[in-house]
Every structure is written in structure tokens, then in C-alpha cells.
Amino acid sequence: MTTTEPAPADHDAPTTADEPALLAWLARMRDEQPVWRDRFGMYHVFRHADVHTVLRDPATFSSDTGRLSPVARTTNRGMLTQIDPPEHRRMRMVVSSAFTPKRVAALEPRIRAITRSLLDDVAGDAFDLVDALAFPLPVTVIAEMLGLPASDHGMFREWADRLFSMQVDDPTDPELGPRVEAAMADIRGYLVERVRERRAAVADGTAGDDLITALVAAEIVTDGSPVLLDDEEAANFSLLLLLAGHITTTVLLGNALRTFHDHPLPDGRNVWTVLGEDPASIPAAIEEVLRLRSPFAQTGRVTTRDVEIAGTTIPADRFVLPSLLSANHDERAFADPEAFVLDRGIGGGAQTAFGHGVHFCLGAPLARLEGRVALEELTARYAALDPVDTDAAALRPYPRGVLGVRNLPVRGTPRHEG
């Protein structure tokens, strides 16, 4: 067991923009250095079992990164992903009823109608999958749930790209705060205005039943007394729902097309052909895509005490970054992990794309439903749908943290000519 802090690394990890290099590096780290201290003093955890250990122990591995990061203290108020139990449970309950399996299943007709309408608008057999479907579908769904107008969707994409494209290496960097604040200023200001409008509507009895209204009207019991979220907290919570509510599905659909193209089945058949013949296999295909190309490569925690992981002692008050992507490629958890296995039979807690433990993604059922409906509609329309350009640089990958591309030109072969 290592009883003192290891020296920080003198190199950086590959980013998600270079997927092959990143996956090769993660495989080497799982074997040789399952807990790695980077040059900023943050500890990365790579093996599946160890990632699960971190994610299911919020008492030791806190989600309140504001403990160490000055910028997080100003941006995390109301952010569900940055709150520990028992406050986390109380906050999650505010909107959890909107994401129950029953409520999500009831959204299927609307999701299918949106999908068909978007595909009906596609001109010709060559189009950009992200522009045509992968972005507008989930952003329309979550915006409708929040009660935000369709006319604002273009701004959401601009703001999301700005945030997810930020390079954040050292979360304790004092210059990071102004950069983050500047990147979030427009979207936060927009949502604060929507929160104030809903609060006024609640006061005068004209409120609707959207999620922002639920946030401003909810009473959260803290220290035995019910309190309302303030404008900043409600706006930040709305921001999380808006961003996480679309980026996962946007990235998932692009990753699905790329994965099907890159991974023919062992018998030589194309995955797309199999899905078209057997739509019931689409949920299993989605799980394999989530495992192989996890939309979010890692998440963050802060230690509350000294703790040992894989023989390394991590001191208290250190950032810990469990790698969701690495866990999903760990040969200790998955046989032949680099292969696309349609009947692998995993789901839920086995693959970690949606996290694990108390912070398991609230919107996972919605993302899975959107992915399933989109692929059902696409495979029903196209006998084949392939990326036109598979060069990662040409596809504008996200630079760090998010594994996916921001555009994906594709060419389809329609099932019905004429």
C-alpha cells in the first residue's frame, strides 16, 4: 500500500478529441496505474470496481466540488449533480416525478411525432445527423418539459457548445472563475428571467405545469423548515436539466451511427441491417453504444477523508475523477470489451455511462427512450445510413470530457423508392 502521496505525473492524459489514443492510454493505466495523480494533484480512477466504489460512497467521495474549487462555489448552487445526501435526495424529489418510467413512457408518442417531423424535413439522402435530428429532437423534448419556446432552441445550442468546449484543466485555477462566469452568463441570465416569470405566475395563480414552475413552487425541507429555491438555485437546476437533458442523446445518436459503422458483427453482418430486421434489438444496441462510447468520459468527486483505492492512499480534500469510459472498457468487468456485442445482456448498473449510486442520471430513461425511438424511425426509413466522413478532426469532436462529435454528415439508402 502506498502511504504517501505519489509524485504528480509529468504528462497529461489524451483528450476525448483523440479517442483511439485515449482508449489505449486508459487500457494501459488500468493495468499499470489504476489510480493516477495528474500534474494538478487530481486522482484519476480507472478500473470498473474502483469506479463503482467511488460512486456509491458519497460520504467519502463528496459531489460538492465547491469544497475545493472557488468557481464551483459560485456556479454549483442548485446543481443537483453537486449536492450530497440528504440535501441531494430532497432536491432530486422536486423533479423526479417527471422522470419516472411511467411518465417517461407517456412521452413516447410526442417523441415519435417530433422525430418523424424532423426526418420529414430532411432534403435528399445526404444530411447532417446532428443538425437534422440528434440535436433538435432531445432539445425540443426537454425544452417542452421546461416550458421554453421552440424559437429559443438555436440559442441553446450556441450556449451548450460554448460550455462544453471549455478547456478546464486545473479546477483550482483562480483565473477559471471569470472564464466560467462569462461562458454561463447568457444562459444563466436567460433562465433567471424564466424563473422570475414563473414565480410571478405562481403568485397570481396563472402558473402552468412545466418543470421550471415545479422548481420555483417546490418547498424543500432543510433543518426541519420548508424553504423555496431562490432565483439562482432554480435557474441552475433548470440549466442542468436543459444541458444534460439534450447533450446525452445528441452525442448518443451520433455515437450510435459511428459505432455501427466501425463494428460489424462477428458474422459479418452490418448492425444497421440487423436493427432494421429486428427493431426489438435496438435497446441492446443502445446499451453497447453507451458502453463503448460513453457520452461523458468522467465525473468528479472530492475526498472527505484519507481513503485507499487500489493500493493507493488518497488524502482528504483531493479531487477524484472516476473514469466512466475506462470502467466501461475494463476487461475485468466485460469479456472482449472492445468488441460490439449485440447480445451482451448488460444494462442499468453494469455499464457506467449514466453513473452509479445516488447520482445515477435522473434522465437516463428519457435518453434511452429518445435513442430507441430515433433508431426505430431511422432504420424504418433507411436500409443503410452511413457516415460520409469518419475522420475525427473533420467531425468537430468535443475537446475534453464529452466523447462525441458536434456534426455528422451521413448518407442514407431509403427503404422505399418513389
Image (cartoon, rainbow, N blue to C red):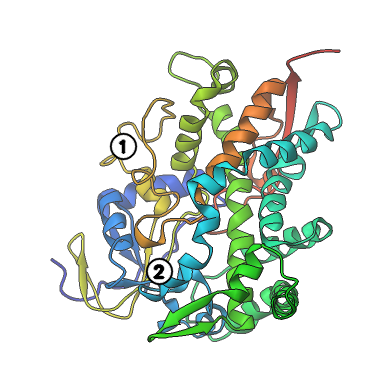
The answer to whether residue 120 is above or below residue 63 is: above
Quick one: SS at disc 1? loop
Identity of the amino acid at label 2? Arg
Q: Quadrant of the N terminus?
A: bottom left
How far from the left and from the top, in percent, is residue 134?
Answer: 68, 43
Around disc 2, counting alpha carbons within 10 Å, would you say few (fewer than 14), some (14 to 19), or many (20 or more)? some
Residue plotted at (64% across, 75% down):
235
Question: Taking 303 as reference, is 135 left or right?
Answer: right
Q: Quadrant of the C terminus?
A: top right
How far from the left and from the top, in percent, is residue 36?
Answer: 32, 63
Residue plotted at (60% across, 46% down):
249
How far from the left and from the top, in percent, is residue 342?
Answer: 44, 26
Question: Taking 300 as reference, is 50 left or right?
Answer: left
Kindly report the distance in space between the C-alpha atoms of the residues bearing marks 1 and 2. Answer: 31 Å
Quick one: SS at disc 2? helix
Q: Please give the residue where the numbered disc 1 appears in the rendered image.
A: 334
Name the disc covering residue 84, or none. Answer: none
Identity of the amino acid at label 1? Phe
Mark 1 or 2, which is nearer the eye?
A: 2
Q: Nearer the viewer, residue 116 or 24?
A: 116
Around disc 1, counting alpha carbons within 10 Å, would you say few (fewer than 14), some (14 to 19), or many (20 or more)? some
The answer to whether residue 417 is above or below residue 158 is: above
Q: Earlier in the sequence, mark 1 or mark 2?
A: 2
Residue plotted at (73% across, 78% down):
189
Residue plotted at (52% across, 53% down):
99
Q: Please give the residue where the numbered disc 2 appears in the rendered image.
A: 89
